[in-house]
Image (cartoon, rainbow, N blue to C red):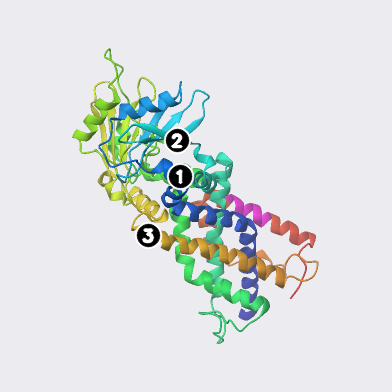
């Protein structure tokens, strides 16, 4: 029978190996996510700085009607179609129109509210903020990139859990546990920086990951959303009944996470002509939606006008849907109508994006981004300085069979909660056993 110290040492070896694997898998992606996340945290400030001629209105004079904005955009881009309109949050800013050109190119056109004059346009993904936004969500690779981002996020949780285990003091020596020893040199110095940085920022990192995962295609779209909706904890029941068997959803529009998979109501085609956009705006104003809202225009003969407010604090979210022919209010959904899971996600998203309590929230979320970059950098330095010559790793090759029942249970539960991560656990486990059997991991301790 093995002694307890020897068993603990072998457990430590296994945990170290999984921490090492996690670092290999996610390090480059976490750096990308952190850098792009830092940029998007300050998206409005960056856009105002880079594009002041597009972002700021020429004066504070009364605004022209929405139809004037649409006419200006179509005149500037013949054959174009306006799909959405963003009314400015601040009075000194411009109106932003989402436009599909005759060449089927998606652009954003900026209109001066008091003059309805086109100030310019850009392709969103060709801007610093737009590139960072798409790169942060999908690495510019669509659904495949989204899955990679989700995997990186899940494996970062593995890094946090295994890192905490490795940090936990196992002797009476406490130096470097709570504060780095700046007198050290070489690998030990970088090790202190690494573990102390992780210790004091791990909760923020975990929050950043968990609050971002609802937007992931697999975990958020295929797991959390269907389950929460089926339990009545997601989108409101009224939204579920509004469309019945139809398959059109809010995902086609600019909607909060809560409504992304909620069925859309439909307009009933009528003999009368559709409402003008100004008439729709008047109805919205009569319902209390006058400023700083986002308006999606009807898509097809059964589409609806959908206006939503998306303030920094999600408690102020409201979505109104109008029949495009009669102006009848088909849906009026506010934060109070959301289920418990949906509310938690919306709060998490607002905090994740640095919106909920202003500049302090931005700085708070900046901390884990900088910490992740520090952890990746120090981890790579530790690996490089600690590996033996001509070897990949300095750690003994562990026998995964020493993993106890509690750890196996944690891995199984994690794989169920995060299905994509669970699949990768199995793949990595198999790869480790193959490499270990082939003798490719060299003994260095």
Q: Are marks 2 and 3 in contact (CB under 8 Å)?
A: no
Report whether 137 appears left or right of 262: right
* N-terminal-most mark, 1 or 2: 1
Circle 1/circle 2 CB separation < 8 Å: yes
- Extreme residue toward the bottom, this view: 172
SS at badge 3:
helix
User: Which residue is depicted at the point 71% across and 59% down?
Assistant: 433
Q: Residue at x 51, y 36 (%)?
A: 123
Q: Nearer the viewer, mark 1 or mark 3?
A: 1
Position of 184 with respect to 304 (left or right) is right
Q: Which residues are magenta?
A: 423-430
Magenta-drawn stretch contains 426: yes
Q: Secondary structure at mark 2?
A: strand
Q: Is residue 192 visible?
A: yes
Helix, strand, or loop for circle 1? Answer: loop
Q: CA distance from mark 1 to mark 2?
A: 10 Å
Q: In the figure, 341 relative to 109: above or below?
A: below
What percent of the width, then of the height, locates residue 234?
35, 44
Where is mark 3, residue-wise?
359
């Amino acid at each position: 029978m093995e002694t307890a110290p020897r068993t603990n040492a072998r457990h430590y070896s296994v945990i170290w190996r999984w921490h090492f694997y996690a670092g290999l898998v996610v390090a480059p992606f976490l750096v990308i996510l952190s850098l792009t996340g830092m940029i998007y945290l300050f998206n409005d400030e960056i856009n105002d700085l880079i594009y002041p001629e597009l972002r700021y209105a020429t004066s504070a004079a009364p605004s022209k009607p929405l139809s004037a904005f649409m006419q200006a955009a179509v005149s500037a881009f013949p054959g174009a179609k306006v799909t959405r309109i963003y009314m400015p949050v601040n009075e000194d800013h411009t109106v932003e129109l989402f436009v599909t050109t005759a060449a089927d190119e998606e652009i954003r056109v900026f209109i001066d509210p008091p003059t309805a004059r086109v100030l310019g346009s850009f392709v969103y993904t060709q801007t610093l903020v737009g590139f960072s936004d798409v790169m942060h969500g999908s690495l510019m690779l669509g659904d495949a990139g989204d899955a990679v981002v989700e995997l990186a996020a899940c494996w970062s949780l593995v890094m946090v859990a295994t890192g905490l285990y490795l940090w936990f003091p196992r002797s009476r020596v406490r130096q470097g546990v709570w504060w780095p020893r700046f007198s050290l040199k070489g690998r030990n110095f970088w090790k202190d920086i690494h573990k102390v940085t992780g210790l004091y920022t791990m909760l923020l990192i975990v929050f950043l990951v968990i609050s971002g995962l609802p937007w992931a295609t697999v975990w958020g779209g295929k797991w959390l959303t269907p389950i929460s909706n089926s339990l009545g904890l997601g989108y409101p029941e009224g939204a579920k009944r509004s469309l019945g068997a139809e398959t059109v959803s809010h995902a086609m529009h600019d909607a909060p996470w809560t409504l992304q998979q909620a069925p859309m109501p439909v307009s009933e085609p009528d003999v009368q002509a559709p409402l003008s956009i100004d008439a729709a705006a008047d109805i919205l104003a009569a319902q209390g939606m006058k400023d700083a809202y986002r308006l999606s225009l009807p898509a097809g003969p059964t589409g609806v006008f959908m206006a939503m407010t998306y303030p920094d604090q999600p408690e102020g979210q409201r979505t109104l849907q109008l029949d495009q022919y009669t102006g009848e209010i088909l849906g009026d959904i506010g934060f109070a109508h959301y289920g418990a899971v949906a509310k938690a996600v919306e709060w998490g998203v607002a905090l994740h994006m640095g919106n909920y309590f202003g500049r302090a929230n931005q700085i708070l979320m900046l901390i884990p981004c900088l910490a992740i970059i520090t952890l990746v950098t120090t981890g790579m330095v530790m690996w490089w300085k600690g590996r033996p010559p001509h070897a990949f790793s300095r750690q003994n090759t562990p026998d995964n069979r020493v993993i106890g029942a509690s750890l196996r249970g944690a891995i199984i539960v994690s794989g169920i909660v995060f299905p994509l991560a669970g699949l990768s656990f199995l793949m990595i486990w198999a790869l480790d056993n193959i490499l270990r059997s082939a003798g490719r991991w060299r003994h260095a301790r």
